[in-house]
Amino acid sequence: MDSGSINHVLDELSEIICFFDDKGNVSYMNRAGYRELDFDSLDFNVCDILPNLFDEDTDISTFIRENTSEDIRSDVYRKNHTCFPVNVHFIIDNNNEVKLGVFITDLREVDSLTKQLNSKEENMRELLRARDEFTANLTHELRTPVNGIRGHVRNLYEKEEDISNKRTMNIVLNCCDNMEKIIDNLLDYAKLENGKMVIESEAFSIRDLIDSSIATLESVANEKGIELRCSISDSIPDVVYGDEFHLSQVINNLLNNAIKFTSSGYVSLDVYKTKHKKKDIELTFFVTDTGIGMSVEDMDKIFNSFSQADGSITREYGGTGLGLYVCKQIVELMGGHIEVESKKGKGTTFTFTINMKTDSESDDSEEMVTISELKASLDVGRNEQLEQSRDFTNEANINKICDLIEKCKLCVELDNWDKAEGFASGIKTRVENAPKEVSSIAFRLVMNARKEKKDKCRDYLDELESLMECVDKAGE
């Protein structure tokens, strides 16, 4: 390519390009240079346009050879001594004769966009600060009335003698507890988003922690007629070092969810040691249930903030969609990970690992079961339980159905249709393999409870009585 063609190409570029000798005398400048710098001839020196980089004493050739590998931020000056910000890149052409050159990129638009971006980032930080302050104030304002309601109801509960009123008060107290959980989730979400959640490392008993969680939730599970199981591997040391509060929060959240979405069968918490090297230990927790399960699409989004498996979950079971998001963030802050496996109608298993410290050292020489082997074993147990709970010829199962019918009747009489629906769902699951006249009644019970047909309370109780007769006959 001849020099004319090269000059034509250079004239088409938006960057300012000029060549000069080792004294700084300019021998060529492209069209962009003439346009931006207002020179009408080549009677100027490179020191005139880049005075911040060169002066009369600068060895231009040496300076450029030492700075050809990097871009330099500077200002370029026009003929009238005004300037604008640029990016400078020096080149050396050793083809025929030594030529020094410079590519100058205008940064005015970039700087303007950077300022706009910085302004928007600052506005965003202000919005986030305002959000965090609002969340903190809101949760504080919510806690005050919730605690006031709880305190007054507890005082009335101690003095109340009427059983029906006491049941109503228990419902109010449960609502206060649920409200407090929502408030805690909102606070945790704000802390996580702001990077202010701190993971502690203190000694505590892992077995005491789990016993406390099971004791707290056992009555909730019993009310629904489901079994709450727990198993802790003997190989786990009793005392570990970690964040007891946040671990308890994860366990309670997962167990609460499992109980909420399970109408029959069981919920289990199984804990194993899956790694132990020196004083570092990895614990793996499995929360398994025989509940409603979920699809693959639902599993992909449940760990996102403000997300639930589907819109009807919120309406039917309640919740903010923050609990699992908070759990995931806490588990990852504790050096672990969390995942879920589930099938529609076949239950769900949440698996999470955390890293902790112990006083006892190990070289990991003891044989430990892998996580996949543990999952397979738990799946077998769950499938067996599902089969047993749906065996209509099983006497224990029939007795359980009768017990659920009695509890459902009591809830209808007390006008507690939320719990009635839960028991009705449990009945429906257990009679799936029953004769058609039994399963059809159970299906109607669920649908009627869902519609909250309070004006037809008597009809609903009659259907429960009819179902009880059918079950008794089948049991004979």
Image (cartoon, rainbow, N blue to C red):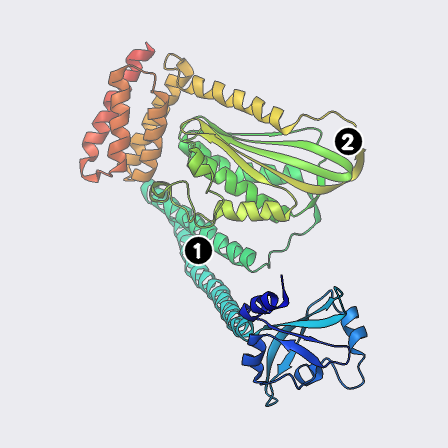
Q: Earlier in the sequence, mark 2 or mark 1?
A: 1
The 10 Å Cα crowd at callout 2, few under 14, some 14 to 19, many 20 or more, is few
Please say if the residues under marks 2 and 1 sit with CB atoms less than 8 Å apart.
no
The structure residue drawn at horizontal position 53% and vertical position 49%, both measured from the top left corner, is 326
Secondary structure found at label 1? helix
| Image quarter (top left, top right, bottom left or bottom right) of the N terminus | bottom right
Label 2 sits on what residue type?
Answer: Asp
The 10 Å Cα crowd at callout 1, few under 14, some 14 to 19, many 20 or more, is few
Of 26 and 233, the residue lying toward us: 26
Residue 180 x, y percent position in the rendering: 46, 52
Residue 64 x, y percent position in the rendering: 76, 72
Of 165 and 335, the residue lying toward us: 335
Label 1 sits on what residue type?
Answer: Gly
Q: Is residue 350 above or below residue 378?
A: below
The structure residue drawn at horizontal position 73% and vertical position 80%, both measured from the top left corner, is 24
Of 261 and 277, the residue lying toward us: 277
Looking at the image, how many numbered discs can be counted on the residues? Answer: 2
| Image quarter (top left, top right, bottom left or bottom right) of the C terminus | top left
Pointer 1 residue? 151
The structure residue drawn at horizontal position 57% and vertical position 48%, both measured from the top left corner, is 329
User: In front: mark 2 or mark 1?
Assistant: 2
